[in-house]
Amino acid sequence: MHYMNGSKPLQLILLMVLSALIFSPAGGYAETESARKIDEPEQNPTIQNLLERIKVLEHQASKDTLQDEIMIAEIKPEYPALRMLGFTDFTFSTTDETGKSTGFREGQFVLHFSSALSQRVSYFAEVSMTPRKDAGTGDPTASGFDVEVERSIIRFDQGDHLKVAAGRFHTPINWWNTTFHHGAWLQTSIGRPEMIGAFVPVHFLGGILEGNLPSGELNLYYHIGIGNGRAEVISRAGDAGDINNTPAWLFNLTSRPDRFFGLQLGVAVYGDKITKSNGREFKEIISAAHIVWNKENPEIIIEGANVHHEAINGGAVFDHQAFYIQLAYRLPVLQAAFKPYARFEYSDIDQADPAFEMLDIFEKAAIAGIRYDLTTHAALKFEYRLQKKKALSEINSGFAQVSFTF
Amino acid sequence: MKRRNQQWTKIILFLVIFVLLSKTALASGDIALVAHPAVPIDNLSFAEARKIFLGNRQYWSNDLRITLLIRAPIARERDIMLKTFYQMSEAQFRQYWISKIFRAEVTSGPKVVFSSEMALELIILIPGSITFVEASQIPKGLKLIKIDGRMPGQDGYPLH
């Protein structure tokens, strides 16, 4: 009777499912006819094949163990541990600016060398090769590329709170300058903002102390530096010695609050004495600030600086401002390979300032573009720029660039 | 008799569900943070652990540097770390470490390990090292780091 009430078949099915679950290994293979003939393997080619396969796997396993041991030996720290990384790009550009031509340009060829010399001491170098427009001309003949030691830094770590470094740095008063400089692939856009150049000093030769400050969830980080400051050509650092006896100094403070993962806020101040080739001297104070939402959905970068110049032997006082806002968003479709972006830049430079007499940057610029990540380490970018200098007409330009790291 | 059959049905059904749940739990177990025995810390806040894996904190103490051991791509442990601590895709993670080397903040990225066994072997060999491994695969005697006071398997543990 109870065979007819439906419980027994259900119990049987459940028991079968349970047995299958308990006794099946991950792969879940069923017993076969050949498996039942395990006592007579020589008569069964499947068993023979399986035995052969086991031998191969055992050999493979011993090889894997050896490979693991080799990899472990490679991973254990050894000093010096030199590593190299490179960046470069190729750009096509077209513009309606008078005197400029349409065509291709080879970007900077940049090599990085980073080496741990011990647990606490490390060295970093950055060498760039920039194509010259006057290649092959002059006497002696100009070479095809300018070679520069962009950065050369030796650093001793006392711990997270104090790191002492000496050398040639990217001046840590601007976010873009220290985050992307010479690494076109790293930045979303093709070019850097106009204010990252001669407007603020991008290189700094001297010593820098840096580290975390005990600040709880604010995660404050500081840089304190002293160095040579601007050279006679104000876009350059005094690599071969300071041009005057007054060192430049800098201080910055950044925060990456725990509560807003991806947010970085920072302020910086920089002081120097500029000595021009005609002997005129100026006191320079630069104050800068940035707010960065350092994610890609969205990416927001806002940065600005004020440059204050004051003639030391009397004369006018000048204040110049520049800022930019960049917005980008990595689209969640098509394997998240596309990232449209836009940037607006503004600078207000007083041309009457003798300290900035050679400075020639755009007053306004509006940029729109799209970045397509070809692979994890290469990107294709297309960009349109509308730029304007004071009292001049607007310039329209288009760019296409492939940039990568290697 | 009918009642007895129903009881058996319930017991077997319970066992089926139990086995299924056990298998699921094994396949999606918590990820534990494991450190070298000399690491002077037993517990980290989530924010502090994130700082360590982001390379923003590089020393346990002034004389003990942190060495990060991270599983190679495709490993479940790596996916969980990218999702929880880094909040990044694989491509963003790679760019993050290249940027960090570019800024001269570190000389290299995390060390890549290819299996849990390799990670656990290196943890013993490299002073200051820290890694993450499926909690079910950790042998006794290794140093587990709590996150916000919680061990793997406890309510509110974030790495799973």
Image: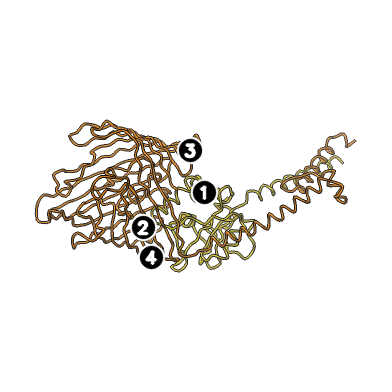
Chain colours: A orange, B yellow
Q: x, y (%) of residue B93?
A: 48, 48
How far is the residue under mark 1 from the one under mark 2? 24 Å
Q: Nearer the viewer, mark 1 or mark 3?
A: 3
How far is the residue under mark 2 from the one under mark 4? 17 Å
Q: Residue furthest right?
A: A1
How far is the residue under mark 1 from the one under mark 3? 16 Å
Instruction: Report whether A361 appears left or right of A311.
Output: right
Instruction: Report whether A351 appears left or right of A146.
Output: left
> Which quadrant would residue A194 be assigned to in this image?
top left
Residue named by callout 2: A221
How far is the residue under mark 3 from the one under mark 2? 32 Å
* Numbered label attached to residue A156: 4
Residue named by callout 1: B82
Q: Secondary structure at mark 4?
A: strand
Q: Disc 2 is attached to a residue of which chain?
A: A
Q: x, y (%) of residue A230?
A: 22, 55
